[in-house]
Amino acid sequence: MNISNQDVQHVAKLARLNLTADEELVFTEQLNAILQYAEKLDGLNTENVEPTTHVLHLSNVMREDEERESLPIEKVFANAPEEEAGQFKVPAVLE
């Protein structure tokens, strides 16, 4: 499958891009090069290769959730600019 200059013009029109004739030519060549490379990948024998979502093995680096004692309420409000009736007091954002 090859991409024609008309394909690039059509996609550019849909994306509302104003491409010059030189840009259309460059994009046409680049997209065809990408397709040719993808065709090479189609020729690889992947029969014994397990499907993966990433090239590298990834593992979760987050620790397990642990229940811990929370801060005392006095320490929580120690850094608060204002507190009222056991709640943070913030400027009104809605009128």
Image: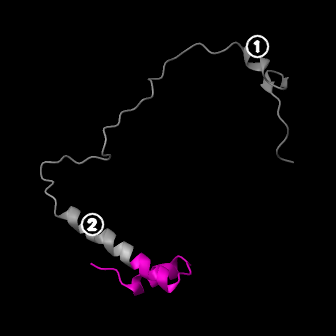
The image's mark for residue 37 is 2
Q: Answer above or below: position of 42 versus 75.
A: below
Extent of the magenta region: 1-28
Amino acid residing under circle 2: Tyr
Q: Main secondary structure of the magenta part?
A: helix
Judged by depth in the image, the label closer to the viewer, 1 or 2, is 2
Q: Residues within 10 Å of mark 2 (few under 14, many from 20)?
A: few
| The one of 85 and 79 positioned closer to us in this rendering | 79
Is the image coloured rainbow, by chain, by secondary structure, or in one colour?
Answer: one colour
Q: Answer above or below: position of 82 versus 38.
A: above
Which residue corresponds to mark 1? 74
Q: Secondary structure at mark 1?
A: helix
Residue 68, image x, y percentages? 55, 14
At x 46%, y 84%, the residue is 9
Amino acid residing under circle 1: Glu
Q: Which numbered disc flags the more N-terminal residue, 1 or 2?
A: 2
At x 59%, y 12%, the residue is 69
At x 31%, y 47%, the residue is 53
Using the rendered view, name the quadrant where residue 37 is placed.
Answer: bottom left
